[in-house]
């Protein structure tokens, strides 16, 4: 390989420079590298007679190589004989003593943090000196003997450091493992260039921004004043004890979204005198996740921060890395169970819910408009809506102004926490839309009253002591199809100002062992923090009686039933179970449910009330009066459920529209006929004229 001749940089060899008191670490590193380079020049000058080939390969170059005259042993022996080399050795020793006394600079921190060995420090010094003074590229060209090789290489650093084997960048060493330096690929036969990673160079230069691999994925999380119920002091004490023992600690903080999990980690870190770096693992692809993990660890070690991991990837195994930040947090849902990590002490914290007083203080602090709301309305918002401190902060940032906006915002923020395990059900009905028996009407009144008053009641320590479990409000609604169970659930949610979420049994029940239990755990844990009423429609499919164990399937089915029973006992939200077959529900569930609502088929008085109300709404007030006699006849003579009456009247309205006529006997008769045909009861309707005579 040939190139243009290399000019010998004589100033490097001819101008000595000694370490002086007050020199910066930067000056000391530059001085040390220059001094070692000058000493190398002197040896090469001795070998070549002050000429180093840089153009075409000469016979002298070949002789030097074949005779192996340029060896570390030969150079060391020559230095012992040459009187001028004593001064060079003294100069190098002066720089190295000064650098050894440095304990506080970024360079010292880097060496200490990654436990760099002497030969690794040599690489670090040469690469940093090159970055500080790009003009040194000429020096490296001269020492390599080739104009195109104007960069530090492993061979070059090895000779500057008098290493006979020339190995200074171990493939398993800290420099490459932590990506402090990088080794670039070159053509075969050329020495590979070594350079500092840009983020490390920035750190050594006195600044440390976010590593490019972390941009868009990580940020410093500031601490905020924690509510009194947060276990900051207890957690700090446990962490201090583990860190004093020289071990690392990983704290898993689980809880609902926006419950302050990352803020708690930041508060704990701040109490320990450090900052917290949050990393969103959801933004990482499979390909870049290992690099992001390593760069986050490196960033945390350089900045002295903890790491807060959150997002989709923390549930699996973390990539291997050469070392770990001593304090790390994992943020996730209640079912997060991290894979154990050797040498790391694991701790687990469940985020405590805000007390009503803490919640009210958060509303007043984070939503300024709430300070002007009437006290009863603010109290209703605080007690009715189970929102997290992050939810309240988000509402404040959105500029929520009125109580109505606050109610809607609370529901919207928690609406999607069940994901595909539940579906939102519209709640268009009012209490006046229900036609119930007097006893059922009174029972529903009691249920709604308890639903409104329960939040404050269960903060009473005496109540919680007497009822450590079972603070939830659950009702079983049983009855034949069409008797108003689902409609009642819609009315309950509307009356309470909450969403109604129907649990998707198809997504919940899984044939694989353990998956159903996992889904149930997710449902009850997330639903407890939602502003919603849970509706288990066709509940007998999920709450079925346990059976005699005849095979493995029965055993696991019973295990899921037992687990569901435990979850229902621990649930502290509002749930409605609707079933057409109450007799199929396991008695253990029934015993634990305080509200049992039986929905009988409507009797003639209830049927008439339903006919009249729906006729006014669907056919219009002007037809309700003329049809009243017919409606009385239908209510008296035809046994229909409320849902059947509604569908029959809907069919009648469309029949009338098709003929361009007002709704009359013929249309209603046809509508009823369709509904009875669905059950094979067409013959029960009888002659149309009997209704005409009665009407």
Image (cartoon, rainbow, N blue to C red):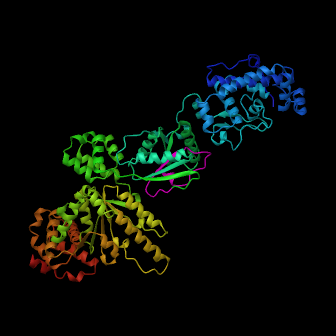
Residue 567's quadrant in the figure? Answer: bottom left
Is residue 71 something that shows in the picture? no
- Residue 194 location, x and y as percent? 69, 34
**Residue at left offset 46%, top offset 42%:** 269
413 versus 111 height, above or below: below
**Residue at left offset 40%, top offset 48%:** 231
Q: Is residue 561 magenta?
A: no
Q: Is residue 649 left or right of residue 626?
A: right
- Residue 44 location, x and y as percent? 83, 24
**Residue at left offset 31%, top offset 70%:** 592
8 versus 616 height, above or below: above
Q: Is residue 379 left or right of residue 163?
A: left
335 versus 237 height, above or below: below
Q: Which residues are magenta?
A: 308-337
- Residue 421 location, x and y as percent? 40, 61
Is residue 531 something that shows in the picture? yes
Using the image as rendered, state which of residue 555 and residue 291 is in the foreground.
Answer: 555
Q: Is residue 192 left or right of residue 421?
A: right
């Amino acid at each position: 390989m040939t190139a243009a001749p290399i000019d010998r940089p004589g100033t490097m060899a001819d101008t000595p420079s000694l370490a002086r008191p007050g020199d910066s670490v930067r000056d000391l590193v530059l001085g040390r590298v220059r001094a070692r380079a000058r000493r190398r020049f002197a040896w090469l000058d001795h070998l070549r007679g002050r000429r180093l080939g840089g153009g075409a390969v000469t016979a002298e170059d070949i002789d030097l190589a074949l005779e192996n005259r340029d060896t570390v042993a030969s150079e060391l022996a020559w230095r012992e004989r040459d009187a001028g080399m004593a001064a060079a050795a003294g100069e190098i020793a002066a720089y190295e003593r000064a650098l050894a006394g440095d304990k506080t600079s970024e360079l010292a921190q880097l060496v200490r943090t990654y436990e760099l060995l002497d030969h690794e420090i040599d690489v670090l010094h040469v690469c940093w000196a090159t970055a500080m003074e790009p003009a040194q590229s000429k020096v490296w060209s001269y020492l390599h003997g080739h104009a195109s090789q104007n960069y530090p290489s492993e061979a070059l650093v090895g000779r500057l450091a008098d290493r006979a084997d020339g190995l200074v960048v171990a493939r398993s060493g800290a420099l490459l493992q932590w990506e402090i330096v990088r080794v670039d690929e070159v053509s075969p036969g050329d020495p590979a260039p070594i350079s500092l990673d840009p983020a490390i160079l920035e750190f050594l230069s006195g600044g440390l921004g976010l590593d490019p691999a972390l941009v868009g994925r990580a940020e410093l999380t500031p601490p905020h004043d924690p509510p009194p119920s947060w276990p900051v002091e207890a957690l700090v004490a446990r962490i201090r004890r583990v860190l004093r023992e020289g071990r690392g600690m990983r704290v898993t903080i689980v809880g609902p979204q926006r419950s302050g999990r990352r803020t708690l980690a930041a508060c704990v870190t701040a109490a320990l005198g450090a900052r917290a770096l949050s990393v969103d693992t959801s933004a990482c692809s499979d390909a870049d996740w290992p690099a992001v993990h390593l760069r986050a660890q490196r960033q945390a070690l350089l900045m002295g921060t903890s790491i807060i991991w959150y997002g989709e990837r923390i549930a699996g195994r973390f990539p291997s890395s050469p070392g770990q930040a001593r304090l790390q947090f994992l943020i996730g849902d209640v079912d997060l169970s991290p894979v154990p990590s050797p040498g790391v002490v694991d701790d687990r914290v469940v985020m405590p819910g805000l007390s009503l007083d803490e919640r009210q203080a958060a509303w007043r602090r984070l939503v300024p408009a709430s300070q002007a709301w009437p006290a009863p309305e603010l109290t209703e918002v605080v007690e009715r809506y189970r929102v997290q401190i992050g939810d309240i902060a988000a509402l404040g940032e959105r500029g929520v102004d009125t109580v109505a906006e606050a109610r809607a915002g609370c529901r919207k923020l928690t609406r999607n926490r069940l994901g595909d395990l539940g579906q939102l059900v519209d709640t268009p009905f009012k209490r006046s839309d229900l036609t119930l028996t007097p006893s059922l009407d009174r029972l529903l009144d009691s249920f709604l009253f308890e639903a409104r008053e329960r939040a404050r009641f269960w903060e009473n320590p005496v109540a919680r002591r007497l009822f450590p479990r079972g603070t939830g409000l659950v009702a079983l609604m049983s009855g034949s199809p069409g008797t108003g169970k689902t409609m009642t659930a819609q009315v309950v949610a509307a009356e309470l100002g909450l969403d109604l979420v129907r649990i998707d049994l198809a997504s919940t029940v899984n044939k694989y062992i353990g998956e159903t239990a996992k889904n149930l755990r997710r449902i009850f844990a997330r639903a407890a923090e939602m502003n919603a009423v849970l509706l288990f429609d066709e509940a007998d499919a999920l709450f079925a009686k346990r059976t005699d164990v005849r095979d493995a399937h029965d055993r696991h089915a019973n295990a899921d039933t037992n687990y569901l029973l435990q979850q229902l006992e621990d649930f502290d939200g509002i749930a409605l179970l609707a079933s057409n077959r109450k007799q199929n529900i396991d008695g253990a569930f029934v015993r634990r449910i305080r509200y049992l609502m039986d929905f009988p088929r409507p009797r003639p008085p209830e049927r008439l009330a339903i006919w009249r109300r729906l006729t006014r709404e669907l056919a219009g007030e002007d037809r309700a009066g003329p049809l009243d006699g017919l409606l009385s006849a239908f209510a008296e003579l035809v046994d229909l459920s409320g849902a059947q009456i509604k569908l029959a009247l809907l069919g009648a309205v469309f029949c009338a529209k098709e003929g361009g006529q007002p709704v009359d006997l013929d249309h209603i008769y046809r509508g009823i006929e369709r509904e009875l045909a669905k059950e094979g009861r067409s013959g029960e309707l009888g002659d149309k004229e009997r209704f005409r005579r009665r009407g």
